Image: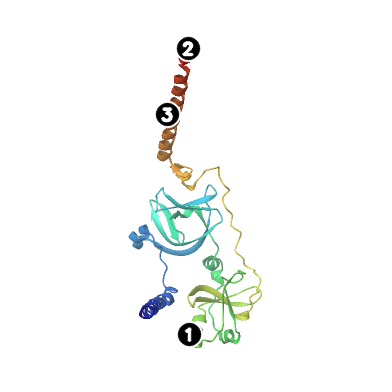
Amino acid sequence: MKKRSAVILLTGIIIALMCPAIFVSADVLWEPNDSFYERNREKCTYLARSFYANGVGGFISLKTEPGANREVAKYENGTVLHIQFTYDHNGDTWGIGYDPGWVRMDQLLLKYDNISFEEEHGHEFYAFTSSIDPLFEHETLIFWTWPGSGEIAMAHEPLSSNRELESNWLTPPHVYRDSEDREWGYVPYFYARRSTWVCISDSSNNEIPAFNAAPEPEFRPPGGAGSSPDDLDGSSTGWLSTPLLIVILVIVVAVASAVLIRTFWKKKDKGDIGPADSAP
């Protein structure tokens, strides 16, 4: 009985310690668990954008650190990776995200996002002067990645659980009006979700058709068999560096020679035994 009580008490303490971390972690800047990043944190630049793999040979190779040869992961072109931080190394920019390892940024293709939309349509934004009260008239509020994307970022319900706080979050710093005269408000932050848009004119409609969808990405054509992004600088062949490949080839030749010599001498020794020698 005492042991059971101790286990229950210990479990309660662990849960109590974990709960604050769970609530706080949703709004804490994520950092990679990477030794090179930890040593060079101050030299890294925050990015937090998504990219497609777009390697020269039809795939990308993630390395242990910028400029390294050792591969830790490999992804085919078209795979989406989130890059959280970048680092400049000998004139090349490298990135790291949720996936382990570092990748050269010139082997990635930017995925169209809200920043891309702002760069394209920012000159059309204007200050918001209306009221956001209509947003609280619906049970569900639909958030989009950007106006006309056709991609729902999230749906929030029920609304008005904290009217004052949500009103502050939902008051957009700027708005955008589309060709159908719908007004869209930019929401920098809402319950740990950042950089989304709400269609103020039709806030609960989750079927607004895409009128500004992301353009189709154009990937590099696959290269020859065994080709790698590292072949750009001629420092490696396939997944192996040139010096390592030479060593492997020398070992293969040496082993093959030893096998041939051993086989040859065995045959020669057997051939020296004639019929006369084998008679009793």
Determine the secondary structure under disc 2. helix
Left or right: where does residue 172 sit relative to residue 180?
left
User: Is label 2 in contact with label 1 (beta carbons under 8 Å)?
Assistant: no
- State how many labels appear: 3
Tell me the quarter of the image containing the N terminus: bottom left
Mark number displayed over residue 165: 1
Q: Nearer the viewer, mark 3 or mark 1?
A: 3
Q: Label 1 is placed on what type of residue?
A: Leu
Q: Nearer the viewer, mark 2 or mark 1?
A: 2
- Residue 150's place in the image compared with 71, above or below, is below
Mark 3 neighbour density, 10 Å: few (under 14) some (14–19) many (20 or more): few
Mark 2 neighbour density, 10 Å: few (under 14) some (14–19) many (20 or more): few
Left or right: where does residue 248 sit relative to residue 186?
left
How far apart marks 3 and 2 lie (CA) works out to 32 Å
- Residue 169's place in the image compared with 95, above or below, is below
Q: Label 2 is placed on what type of residue?
A: Ala
Closer to us: 253 or 127? 253
Applied colour scheme: rainbow
Residue position marked by numbered label 2 in the rendering: 276
Residue position marked by numbered label 3 in the rendering: 258
Q: Residue furthest left?
A: 39
